[in-house]
Amino acid sequence: MENQAKIADFDSILESRGVTRRDFLGLCASIAAAAGLSQMAIPRIAHALEESVIGAKQGALYPVIWIEGASCTGCTESFAQIETPDVGAIVLDLISLNYSETLSAAAGHSVEEAKAQTIAAGNYILVYEGAVLKAFEGNALRVAGEVGTSALVEAAESANAVVALGSCAVNGGWCAAHPNPAQAMGVQQYLEEVGVEATVVNVPGCPANPEWLMSILVDVVVMKDVSLLLDRLNSENKPDDIFGQTIHDNCERRGHFENGEFVYKFGSEEEAKGYCLYPLGCRGPQTKSNCGVVLWNNRRSWCVQAGAPCIGCCEANPANPGDNWVQVNTPFYKRMRDLRIGDWLVQPTVIGVGLTAIVAACLVVHGFGMKLTGRMDGGAPFEKIRKWDAKHPEKSIGKYDLTPEERQALAEKDCGHAVSLDETRGGQS
Amino acid sequence: MTRSVIDPITRIEGHLRVEMEVDSHGIVSDAWVSGGCFRGMELVVQDRTPEDAAQIVERICGVCPVSHAHASSIAGDKAYGITISNKARIVRNLIEGAQFLHSNILWLYNLAALDYVNPLNALNANIPDTYELAQAVGTSMNTDFYALAEKLTKFAENGQLSIFSGNWFGADEGTAYTMTPEADLICTAHYLEALKMQARASEVSALLGGKMPHVMTIIPGGCMWVPTEQKLDDLKAMCEEIRTWCNETLLQDTLVLAQFYGDALNWGKGCGRYVAWGVFEGPKWPYANYEEQMRNRYLPMGVIDENFKVTSVQESSITEYMGHSWYKGSETYTSPYFVTEPDFTSYDVNDRYSWVKCPAYDGRPMEAGSMARVFSAYLQGVDFVVDGVDTISDALGAQRGDLSAFQSTLGRTAIRQVETLYIADLMCQWVDDLMEAIKGGEEDYFKEPETITGSGTGFWEAPRGALYHHEDVKDGKITGYQIIIPSTWNLAPINADGVHGPLEQALIGIPVADIEMPINALRTVHSFDPCTACAVHVSQPSTGKHFETVTNPWGVK
């Protein structure tokens, strides 16, 4: 490869620093001895430092290191489901994914070398997936003979930005749920604790939607302006355009909530009608994410569309592993959560029954309100002419006095302005 | 004698280390496999509901989440005494099948194939010859090979290696990767097509489950998804698209690999005993008892000994030992009553060296996975599987019915395609079955429990092999949860009798020419498709008390 660092280049770098090749090999020997390696290993280390295993250190592709901490690989998997562009195009045309435990061709010390060289070359972003584990002095996660936390620190220190991808990376996720036996926590909190200064972008979700990560790559890699990304972050370092509104705000079943039309049993007829899943515990009203807008898997569906209540998997407070989505939201299919005091647990049934009654009563009242204001079938008729149109007849684009024939003709022409075919709804556009 | 270490093993799920002793003839004489991550799932689901557990345990693994949600839901069904409806059975089979297709396609092309295929060598391909070769072996030509070669050239000219950084394509002094540039180009095209096709299979899971990974609609009592006409045509079309691609591509490419890497038939056997709990509930639902249910699955249950004799599973024959793992004590426990407490000491292959415990059946290590399922189905006469296995036997020049021909690294890699093709076919059949069931207007998709106290075991399969979930439930809350994951069987450390686990046994005897890049070890590890994050598990709450008060019990802010 043309851009590859050659031995000659390397020698000249050494020379410029006043180091001879012989000094350098001596240095390698002392590193090897310190690491407890035999003399046999020396040529390999020298080889590793001299030759680039990542090819050109910079180029048309943006270098990315993707580390899996205590992960299920679900966020990598999720990213592998991305379309337009698909993941094949991304790793060949957009980013140089120099380290990925799931996709890298290399293994063992070779892939570790690739990571070390990417860090040394700089100008990369780090994607960290999975929780940070502190139990057993970090030995709850061991990679390449080291504790997992040291790999994080090493890669985070020189990164242009650190993306904590998925709820586990944001605050430990389910791993941090009671009793948190592995002492899981999020990336931002861990780096603060050990005093590493890094720009952490928190992208919760279990898993994170690939479009969310892609939107970050658009800022950093396509538009090449990290400040665009920083401008999007809220006080929890989450992109506000993604995590600023609730699921409920944009829910496709929201109309049925307003109408007081609910699903009370899984897999029921009401479910097929797309009624609201609130009584089955849906966490849409308190979970901030744009799932219902961005959708999942080639925009095929999302939880609520498939009939599953939101279980709040994007709930993740980066400052507190105890506020992980499992702890906050279980039991998922009930509207009230369990009280836990140490190992003592109570489902507040009595309080709960009272609360359910209040909620149900409120919803009924809400439903009546909808009916009275004509926002439900059989209610008051809609306005015959939109008020704005009546006020500004010269600017109105609505046609209000069509014969049924004209209406039909217009509809068939598929003309620009909306024409209602529904006689009973008058001429609303 | 020298040591060769691969850490981390890439292109798998989770964190795995392999350490090998290589003798003076370049043959592995001893091996130790170490799982590197402990999270403690069983402790987290303690005191939560079985419905919550199905959603939480699924997060063990992002590659095979459906199987965990499914096995947990089966355990919940059993604990509650619910027989799910026929329609729910079909929907669950479809979600599971879509995940198997996703996982098997991803594994073959995107995880395992880079041990055999060198996409950088594809740059040297002669394009007309490539078309000729593809036609000769009968594999699919959906990709424009000219355009792909151009794309790869542009990639190479830029010089950054991306996912090929640090590759082992030059291992064994350049003799490890033996495919011609034309064959490499075809397989690289299929690598990229497979990335799209595995995503297509996940799209089926998402249609039925909301999203993938971590589907949302499988629950004790049935499923939440209800089919509508708008969705059924999408479902049918996607299943047919995947089946067509698999039929045109999988076996043909496997036979190409076999031509270049025939020596991989000579090593990597493993322990030679297999467990499969069976997967995809059968068509004559419901069955009289659990054993009938497991025997009549589309891929049936079977415990297979070294002479290929098949028997039914006895739950009490499953034990776990942890004397070489990072847990307190050295006892052997019998299913489903395991007690373990994590306790890291140090990495020492002569003592404790893994977070993975050592399960056994009748006191001996067992291999789980696709090969176990296919053997079980073959030996019990599942027609599609018998035909598929015989076809590969013919192509490899092996005698029909001699399953020992597959007990190797390449055999394990090849035989899985029979399963993938079978499932691709079944998916289309199940869509038709679902439409029939809808027309028949059968019962609901979900049944409420009548009792919320009991115990249940979910014997099931993940793509990586036999999966076991057990739960004890009292008043709707879990009092004990136990999981034995496929890779726990395969990645087991040395047992109480000093016998190595299945992957360790498979590694012993393989040729390693270059201890820096032991490519044959990597090929052997990938033939098992290991999944380490889920392989590590514990049970029984630790005694440490955490005092934590939740001030807002409604969860509504």
Image (spheres, coloured by chain):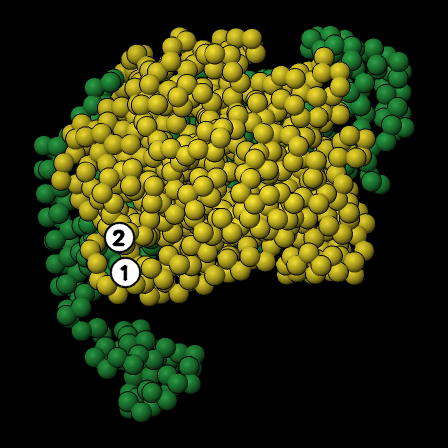
Chain colours: A green, B yellow
Instruction: Check contact, mark 2 vs mark 1: CB within 8 A.
Output: yes
Q: Is residue B312 above or below residue B128?
A: above
Quadrant for the C terminus of chain B, please: top left
| Picture coordinates of residue B554, whole percent (x, y) | 21, 35
Residue B235 coordinates in the image, percent (x, y)? 41, 60
Q: Residue at 53%, 25% (x, y): give it.
A: B271
Q: Amino acid at mark 1?
A: Ala
Q: Quadrant of residue B476?
A: top left
Residue at figure coordinates x 36%, y 49% from the top left: B93
- Where the N terminus of chain B falls, by quadrant? top right
**Which residue is tagged 2?**
B86
For residue B437, the mark is 1
Q: Would residue B464 be seen by someone viewing this image from the given angle?
A: no
Left or right: A18 in relation to A273: right
Q: How many marks?
A: 2
Q: Is residue B454 left or right of residue B351?
A: left
